[in-house]
Image (cartoon, grey):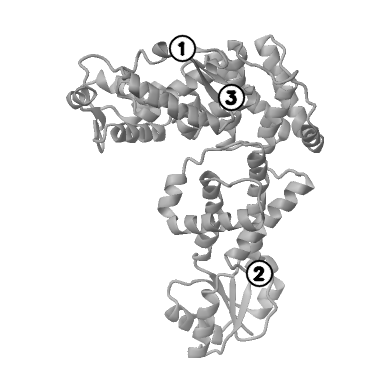
């Protein structure tokens, strides 16, 4: 169970009254939204509600039931009721942070009270997990250790953090609260480095990328302090691929280099030059609020993949809305490709909600993604987190398609026939957003006045501005006119 959940239980266990979410949030230093999410997690953890909620009163712990479920008569011992996944993640985290040094198995498990057979099962499972990162679990009598390249060790640490509640926090402050060993000074230092990155790049780094960078610096600093880092070769940048990426991203590399120098000064140590490159990988793998120039190869790949999705959805590439969708996709796919190339994973905290709200759409994007991997011979697999992000762009496109069209009614003079046309159209399409009735002259002479119009129903020929569509209609708006307007309104493209 995470630190926030533990704190919530401890606060509620000391109170015989209802405590509001706002009081809990202020006491712990996190958002009320995080409080509610943590409470739901606690209740799910015990398979039944042990924290009751009443509107207008707040939250209260069913203490008797809590003690019964945890089989304890005293204070909370979180490790006693850890799930197998939580327990393995805690053991794996300890092994990774202490790698390559060995740990005594009995000491790692002394607080869990599990059998020797269960420990053996845990270590077998952990060994298989490590293989995904080209790491191995070494057993030497009663000791066990993780063996492998330092970079792979840190990637594995980041992956374990992602499986925990920490990487699902939506703000840096909530994320930080999950780490009990992070001092106030380290917190301030790493936060300052994030602010420096944003200032030097003149942008804002949104979630989850801000959390990823914070996590990367946190892991780097902890590994350096523990003296556990083993550098392959001499830690210098000699790989041609690395050099090429650095040359293609000089601005990003300078920022990365500045941050790593600050870390070295803060820790009063020398840090290998390769660390500047590792941070660079994170910087070019993030999506920013500003658009940056990427190398031609990445841009070409992202455009090809975006066009593949558009084609598979059967959308009209000439439509302005589809062009906007494609631009959004390219903007996301470019850094996504860098993430996949550099084995950087970002947690999609709303993935479950996406699958629930847009289940069929998610499956369709996933099927197209698999087809793209085969037909375009992509060198990597696109995971569900990334597919979830891509699904949101198509969900936005579809949701916008269902919005009421803004319709302008027009005739030669703007009076008489157009008034009748208004009544008939409104009667036939009561939910239509009719923004006005005007004359052709007024439309031509006041271009800015009707910029946001989607459809013009006119009794006279007119050349539309921007992307507005025109349908010529008789003043009587007969059945044929109604059918033509209906077809136009229902045309997604």
Mark 2, other Cα within 10 Å: few <14 / some 14–19 / many ≥20: some
Q: Secondary structure at mark 3?
A: helix
| Residue 311 shows in the view | yes
Q: For marks 2 and 3, give the one nearer the viewer.
A: 3
Classify mark 1: helix, strand or loop.
loop
Give left or right: position of 50 versus 112: left
Q: Quadrant of residue 165?
A: top left
Q: Is residue 416 visible?
A: no
Using the image as rendered, state which of residue 6 and residue 415 is in the foreground. Answer: 6
Instruction: Compute the Cα span from label 1 to label 2.
Output: 73 Å
* Residue 227, placed above or below residue 377: above
Above or below — where is 300 with respect to 240?
Answer: below
Q: Which residue is mark 3?
A: 153
- For label 2, the residue is 467
Q: Nearer the viewer, residue 370 or 146?
A: 146
Earlier-in-chain disc, 1 versus 2: 1
Residue at 69 percent across and 18 percent down: it is: 231
In the figure, is residue 214 to the left or right of 176?
right
Q: Earlier in the sequence, mark 1 or mark 3?
A: 1
Residue 141's label in the rendered image is: 1
Mark 2 or 3, nearer chain start: 3
Across the whole image, how many numbered discs are drawn on residues? Answer: 3
Q: Residues within 10 Å of mark 3 (few under 14, many from 20)?
A: many
3D distance between C-alphas at marks 1 and 3: 23 Å
The dot on residue 268 is none
Task: Please identify the quarter of the rendering in which residue 236 is found.
Answer: top right
The image shows residue 139 at horizontal and vertical percentages of 49, 17
Residue at 58 percent of width and 47 percent of height: 382
**Disc 1 residue crowd, few under 14, some 14–19, many 20+, Cα 10 Å:** few
């Amino acid at each position: 169970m995470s630190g926030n959940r533990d704190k919530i239980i401890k606060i509620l266990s000391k109170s015989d009254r209802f405590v509001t979410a706002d009081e809990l949030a202020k006491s712990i230093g996190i958002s009320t939204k995080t409080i509610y999410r943590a409470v739901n997690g606690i209740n799910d953890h015990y398979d039944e509600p042990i924290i009751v909620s009443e509107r207008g009163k707040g939250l209260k712990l069913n203490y008797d039931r809590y003690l019964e479920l945890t089989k304890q008569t005293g204070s909370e011992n979180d490790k006693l009721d850890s799930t197998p996944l939580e327990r393995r993640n805690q053991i794996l985290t300890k092994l990774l942070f202490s790698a390559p040094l060995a740990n005594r198995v009995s000491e790692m498990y002394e607080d869990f009270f599990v059998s020797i057979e269960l420990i053996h099962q845990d270590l077998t499972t952990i060994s298989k997990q490590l293989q995904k990162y080209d790491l191995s679990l070494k057993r030497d009598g009663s000791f066990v250790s993780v063996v492998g390249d330092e970079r792979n060790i840190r990637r594995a640490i980041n992956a374990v953090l992602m499986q925990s509640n920490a990487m699902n926090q939506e703000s840096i402050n909530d994320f930080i609260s999950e780490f009990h060993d992070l001092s106030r000074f380290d917190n301030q230092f790493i936060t300052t480095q994030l602010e420096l990155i944003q200032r030097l790049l003149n942008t804002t780094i949104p979630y989850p990328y801000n959390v990823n960078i914070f996590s990367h610096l946190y892991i780097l600093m902890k590994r350096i302090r523990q003296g556990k880092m083993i550098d392959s070769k001499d830690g210098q940048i000699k790989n041609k691929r690395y050099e090429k990426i650095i040359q293609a991203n000089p601005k990003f590399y300078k920022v990365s280099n500045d941050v790593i120098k600050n870390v070295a000064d803060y820790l009063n140590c020398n840090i290998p030059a390769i660390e500047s490159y590792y941070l660079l990988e994170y910087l070019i793998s993030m999506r920013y609020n500003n658009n940056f120039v990427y190398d031609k190869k990445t841009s070409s790949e992202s455009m090809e993949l975006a066009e593949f999705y558009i084609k598979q959805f059967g959308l009209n590439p000439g439509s302005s809305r589809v062009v906007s969708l494609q631009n959004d996709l390219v903007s996301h796919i470019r850094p996504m490709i860098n993430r996949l190339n550099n084995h950087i994973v970002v947690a999609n905290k709303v993935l479950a909600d996406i699958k629930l709200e847009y289940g069929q759409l998610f499956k369709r994007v996933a099927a197209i993604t698999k087809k793209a991997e085969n037909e375009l011979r992509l060198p990597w697999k696109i995971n569900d987190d990334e597919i979830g992000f891509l699904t949101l762009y198509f969900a936005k496109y579809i949701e916008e398609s269902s919005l009421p069209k803004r319709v302008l009614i027009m005739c030669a003079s703007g009076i008489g026939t157009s008034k009748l046309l208004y009544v008939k159209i409104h009667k036939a399409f009561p939910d239509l957003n009719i923004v006005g009735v005007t004359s052709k002259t007024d439309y031509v002479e006041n271009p800015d006045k009707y910029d946001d119009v989607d459809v013009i129903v006119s009794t006279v020929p007119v050349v539309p501005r921007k992307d507005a569509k025109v349908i010529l209609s008789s003043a009587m708006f007969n059945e044929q006119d109604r059918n033509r307007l209906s077809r136009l309104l229902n045309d997604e493209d």
